[in-house]
Image: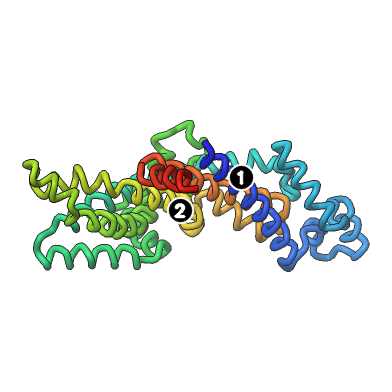
């Protein structure tokens, strides 16, 4: 409980610091939303009137205080340009982005974990070199280039085997789950193949460290084959490291799908954030970035707690340090 409380306190402090960084960084950016809303040929008086109407003429401290007060109340503000609630905007976009990330992560796990285990279990030097080459090539493919290749191969209307939609998302959203899921297959593959190569490397490194350890030798002396010992004992010992990697990979995939969403014309968080930044919609952008930062930190908090639960050695180390003190 003390560990969880300590991590929660760090979470709150880090989130507060990030809110200051986000607020300050957006005020440094060139451009003015008042000028955008007033029009290209607006007079300086009209721009000044618009700034006053939007509250942009107040001090930065007052603007930050209003924003943080609203966040504490659960109010993420209203988009200056569209007039819609930022909460509603993020919810509608997250309904596309998070399923895309989950499907992409499932594809990555289906690729990375078996290939990583196979790379450790491979006995011949040629097989190990082949797995090593696969990991390097998969991780070196840019997401944009990989997505374009998938469109040219499987995109409906343009691909060699045009069986999957390559642009957009159904207007009815998840009311038609089959069509919605099909529209995410190619984007998820674009992300999953690259992330799968990274998970493969991490799995090989984590599992390889236990493949020749005394734990596996003990399991083999009890009658297990090398494959059984590595998969049953070594993989269990490597699970805490893999959970940490997979959790942080899941969080970092949000930034990775921004390019993919723009390529496949998906109205997700990444695509919407790029649009809001271009329109200088500060209220929407700063709230969206704050929510993304909270998601990153929240995943880190969950990974820390899971790592401690899965690895009893951390509890033992803490207990011994407390006894020595």
Residue depicted at 48% across the width and 42% down the height: 302
277 to the left or right of 36: left
Between residue 304 and residue 99, name the one nearer to us: 304
93 to the left or right of 57: left
Q: Tell me residue 212's x, y (percent).
A: 17, 56
Residue depicted at 21% across the width and 52% down the height: 117
For label 1, the SS is helix
Q: Which residue is mark 1?
A: 9
User: Splitting the image into 4 quarters, where does residue 88 fall?
Assistant: top right
**Compared with residue 196, is residue 40 higher up or lower down, i.e. above or below?**
below
Q: Tell me residue 281's x, y (percent).
A: 71, 54
Residue depicted at 20% across the width and 44% down the height: 233
**Compared with residue 284, is residue 172 higher up or lower down, i.e. above or below?**
above
Between residue 108 and residue 79, name the one nearer to us: 108
Q: Tell me residue 48's x, y (percent).
A: 90, 60
Q: Which residue is mark 2?
A: 253
């Amino acid at each position: 409980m003390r560990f969880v409380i300590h991590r929660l306190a760090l979470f709150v402090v880090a989130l507060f610091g990030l809110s200051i960084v986000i607020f300050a960084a957006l005020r440094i950016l060139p451009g003015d939303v008042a000028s955008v809303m007033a029009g290209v040929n607006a007079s300086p008086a009209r721009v000044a009137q618009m700034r006053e109407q939007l509250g942009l003429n107040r001090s930065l401290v007052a603007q930050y205080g209003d924003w943080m007060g609203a966040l504490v109340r659960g109010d993420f503000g209203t988009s200056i340009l569209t007039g819609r609630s930022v909460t509603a905007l993020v919810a509608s976009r997250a309904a596309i982005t998070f399923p895309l990330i989950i499907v992409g992560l499932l594809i990555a796990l289906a690729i990375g974990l078996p290939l990583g285990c196979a790379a450790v279990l491979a006995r011949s030097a040629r097989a190990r070199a082949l797995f090593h080459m696969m990991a390097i090539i998969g991780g070196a493919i840019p997401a944009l280039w990989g997505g374009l290749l998938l469109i040219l191969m499987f995109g409906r209307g343009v691909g060699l085997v045009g069986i999957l939609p390559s642009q957009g998302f159904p207007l009815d959203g998840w009311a038609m789950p089959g069509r919605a899921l099909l529209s995410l297959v190619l984007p998820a593959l674009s992300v999953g193949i690259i992330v799968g190569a990274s998970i493969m490397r991490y799995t090989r490194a984590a599992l390889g460290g236990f493949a020749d350890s005394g734990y596996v030798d003990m399991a083999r002396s009890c009658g297990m084959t090398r494959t059984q010992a590595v998969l049953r004992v070594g993989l269990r010992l490597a699970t805490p490291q893999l959970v940490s990697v997979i959790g942080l990979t899941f969080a970092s995939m949000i930034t990775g799908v921004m390019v993919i969403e723009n390529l496949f014309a998906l109205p997700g968080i990444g695509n919407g954030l790029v649009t809001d930044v271009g329109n200088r919609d500060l209220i929407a952008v700063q709230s969206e970035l704050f929510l993304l930062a909270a998601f990153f930190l929240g995943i880190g908090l969950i990974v820390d707690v899971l790592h401690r639960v899965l690895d009893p050695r951390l509890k033992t180390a803490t207990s011994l340090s407390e006894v020595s003190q």
